[in-house]
Amino acid sequence: MIIIHLFPLLPIAATFGLLLALRGPSFTYSVILVFFLLICFLNRLFFKEKLLVFTFVFLVYYGVGFLAIENNVTDYVPGEQVMYGEIKTIPKIDGDALSMQIKTDTKETIHVQAYFKSEEEQKWMRTFSVGDFCKINGTLGAPLPPTNFGQFNYKKYLFEQGVHWILRPKQTGIECIQRKEPYSVYMKMQRWRHKQLTWIERDVRSDFRGIMSALLFGERVLIEEDVMYAYQKLGVIHLLAVSGLHVGMIVAALFYLLIRVGLTRERTIELLIALLPIYIIIAGAAPSVIRASLMTIVVLLFMRAKGKIPPLFAIVVVYMLFILIRPFVLFHLGFQLSFLVSFGLMVSAPSIQKRYTQKMVQLLAVTVLSQLFSAPVLLFHMHEISLLSIPMNMVYIPFISLFVLPLTFLSFLISFFLPLPFNIPLHFLEKIVPMIHSVLLAVAEHKGSSFIVGKPNFYIVFMLYFCIFYGLMKWEQKNKGWWKTPTLFIFLLLTVHFSMPYMDSRGKITMIDVGQGDSFLLELPYRKEVYLIDTGGTMSFSQEEKWRERNKSFEVGKDIVVPTLKALGIRKINNLVLTHGHLDHIGGSKAVAQSIKIEQVLYGKGQVEGELEITLLNEIANSGANILFIEEGINWSSGETQFVVLSPIGTEQNLNARSIVLYVEMQGISILFTGDLEEEGENRLIKDYPALQVDILKAGHHGSRTSTSSHFLSHLKPKAVFISAGRNNRFGHPHEEVVNRLEEDNISVWRSDLHGAVQLTLKDRKIKMKKIKDEGK
């Protein structure tokens, strides 16, 4: 009896101990810890024993976390250097980009990012694999921290993997050789895995190879970008993770085959226990496959000992071992989802089987519970929820698990015995899967397929889980109306979360870091309206050859602007102001229009002749937005916020000169957005608006020497200036003359290339400034 009450404390105590060591104390942590101890105190049964067990496990895992931090150090310093190391991970080659990790002679892991100058370099690098040695001449630098609010922290992610540096080789700076001495067993398995992935990439159709590599080897790099996005948006991405389904299928098949060929039950179990660690490596060693395989090993060990094991015991043991060996995995999204969903379904499975007898109803119950257990974590990381997740899972779970997965395994096995033309299951999958994906893509294209929630704080996430577990307890007790109270509280929590921006009387201006480009977000008081001024754009300076094309390409609108908007819970843009038709200002608008509802686009009056302008304006119009061409003199207000257009006049020939110049006055603070306006346009503003003065100026043309003249500054008398420019950009923006000019006038300067995103909060003529670098403090 006492063990039953104490056993669930183990993972909770271990988690609290690790969190304190790895993240340090915080107010949120203290509140939740006190809340949990209060629940234990109110339930006085075995209270002393609970407190003793909790304290012991807490201290043990605190020590584990403390040692993990102490040992996660580096022996290197930044700068140019020659490094020698063994390739640790399978080199990922995507077009002209290379990404891999090496283990140096000091046993430290270094992340390598390189770009090929020729197709021959790319083909040469494909001949190397895990275990080969490389000499790399390049520059060692620290990973960049996030430069936008709510952005994924890649630097922290690498740190938690024990990686402190990124090595960027010089041109022809990589020299690799294959080892002559024998490879270890681990290296041999990794090289075999690499060989099979290469076969899939070379011989399988492009619209199926990504799914095949994901289902067999846990590698998603080959999945087409739009297909991956559709799986994520519709909440079925978990089907592409190697997990319990794969492990169960393999173990069941091997168990049956080995028994049929004459092995005893005992020898079969022992062989399966020995093979599962090998499968973990071959399948990519993701948290989901490690969890499923280790749980299976625990169950098999008990079967071998002719004992019964409660499922909860297996998952707790695996969880405790997992975070003991890899403490930082606690912050891995895949780890969190894998254990949360598995734990929830394991606890709920007996009730589902007793209450529901029809298979489809059981599937529906499992799907709903899986979505419930994963939803709060996904909201915290992804900021939106799929409205079609349950019906899509109801269709795709049987399709993938009963059809695609078995045939994929079968086609892979056949490839070892028959030539490719005779691999009937593979050819069938190559035909049917792309057809199914076309449906998936069509559904994902609709904005109504998901609902943007915004990033909830940790209290909201915690309370959501509290409501979910409370509701499930009532469901298991078969209480009538069990769903009413938890549903009401979940509704209230989400309502509070949704309502917070609309109860905020402050205005906000955010300079989004889009690299070499412009993008400014304006949120009016009480979020009465949302304005986005420009969307940045991914600049390209050369015509890409076929071999350079990447499966996953970076695009500012999709990868920076849209996630920023989603994190803030912005579902609608009232006015998208596109200052002029250059790529670095409007290139990201297509991605924004595909993900966020745009009511109206404001575009400068004048002849629209550029192919980029015409294409993007047509696509935005097709998304349902109204396009309004504006010129000098147009003004309007929203609440107490005033807007005045000062340019263009409509006859400018140069695109920069045609930039929309927008004067905004919000909460008593005046701001002037100038697009890429240059000195000639500035002089016209001085002449036409002799009384114009502003508190904040957005420097024209990214701080180039042709803008932000001393005459213009002395006329406007700004107290602060925004400069949006890319780090180490090839244009030399902002120009040294402009920076010196601003410093001489004692004007505060906020630069995206130095500070990243900057947010101003405006209230009663007062400004509160927050930089992205201050967010973690």
Image (tube, rainbow, N blue to C red):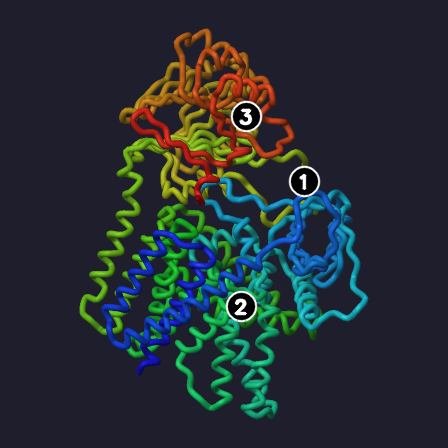
Camera-side mark, 2 or 3: 2
State the image coordinates of residue 535 (x, y, percent, origin top left).
48, 33
Mark 2 or 3, nearer chain start:
2
Question: Please, what is the three-letter code of the amino acid marked with disc 3?
Answer: His
Decide: is 738 above or below 392: above
Residue 702 is labelled as 3
Q: Amino acid at mark 2?
A: Ile
Closest to the camera, between mark 1 and mark 3, is 3
Cα–Cα gap, marks 1 and 3: 27 Å
Q: Which image quarter is the N terminus in?
A: bottom left
The answer, for residue 614, to whether it is visible in the render is: no
Instruction: Return the residue found at the far right.
Output: 180
How crowded pointer 1 is (Cα within 10 Å; few <14, some 14-19, many 20+) is rated as: few
Real-space CA distance between mark 2 and mark 1, rounded to the nearest whole angstrom = 45 Å
Circle 1 sits on which residue?
A: 544
The quarter of the picture where the C terminus appears is top left
Q: Residue furthest left?
A: 480
Q: Is disc 2 in contact with disc 1, using a CB cutoff of under 8 Å?
A: no
User: Residue at position x 44%, y 47% from top?
Assistant: 445
Numbered disc 3: secondary structure? helix
Kindly identify which residue carries mark 2. Answer: 325
Above or below residue 339? Residue 774 is: above
